[in-house]
Image (cartoon, helix red, strand yellow):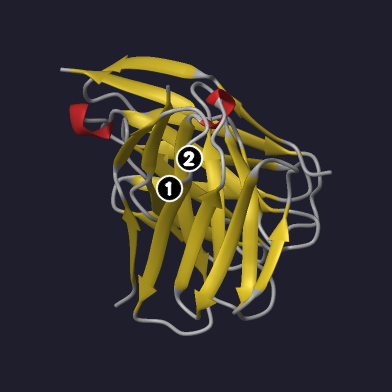
Amino acid sequence: SQTIHQWPATLVQPVGSPLSLECTVEGTSNPNLYWYRQAAGRGLQLLFYSVGIGQISSEVPQNLSASRPQDRQFILSSKKLLLSDSGFYLCAWSANRGPFTEAFFGQGTRLTVV
Amino acid sequence: KQEVTQIPAALSVPEGENLVLNCSFTDSAIYNLQWFRQDPGKGLTSLLLIQSSQREQTSGRLNASLDKSSGRSTLYIAASQPGDSATYLCAVPSYNNNDMRFGAGTRLTVKP
């Protein structure tokens, strides 16, 4: 069966510090991968998605970036965090076969920038 | 642009009640619709996926219906339990089918 792992679960970082959140998927190959952010009391906002290694699409201009160094690994990064980067970050995957299929989410990372 | 709306934003019911959560979307040309559950501070758990060719899907006490032409879906929860307390989100594929558009969710509280 497929599983998705996301870490760390919580993170407190000072303004201006770098960020690296990691997500890995097991039990499937060539998945579509996604990073979402959920602000308090608001819906989920898509940040990045990837349909293959090295293929990253960004939905929202920001100081965050994403990379996919391996087929089932998706990394969210920042060189310098802002206070506004605080939020709940979720990684997700879906099968890469035609129109958007069922999506599965990790347990999320709570990021607090202080 | 696909917009997803969920009503009500919050709902509180006594244990044992049957209840309905609503989801509406603006673009009816969707391939599927997915319902999720989110517990506080946790990720999303997939509950049901309805394909565009289906009118409903059932899993245990949950039944989700889909009316594409009217841009609506409902999630029916039978005999609610305190353990059902969570936020329920619906999502549909975006116009380019590369991701999903989410509603803001309905926060459900089932009181013992």
The quarter of the picture where the N terminus of chain B appears is top right
Q: Is residue B5 something one can see in this rendering?
A: yes
Circle 1: residue type? Asn
- Answer above or below: position of A20 versus B86: below
Counting from the top left corner in percent of width and height, residue A7 is at: 32, 53
Examine the image and state in which quarter residue A58 appears. Answer: bottom right
| Badge number at residue B63 | 1
Q: Earlier in the sequence, mark 1 or mark 2?
A: 1
Q: Residues within 10 Å of mark 1 (few under 14, many from 20)?
A: some
Q: Is residue B25 above or below residue B96?
A: above
Question: Which chain contains the residue that carries disc 1?
Answer: B
Query: Is A92 on the left-hand or right-hand side of B103?
Result: left
Residue drawn where x is 73% and y is 50% of the image: A59
| Of A46 and A113, the residue lying toward us | A113
Tell me, for residue B75, which label it has, or none.
2
| Total residue callouts | 2
SS at badge 2: strand
Which residue sits furthest bottom?
A29
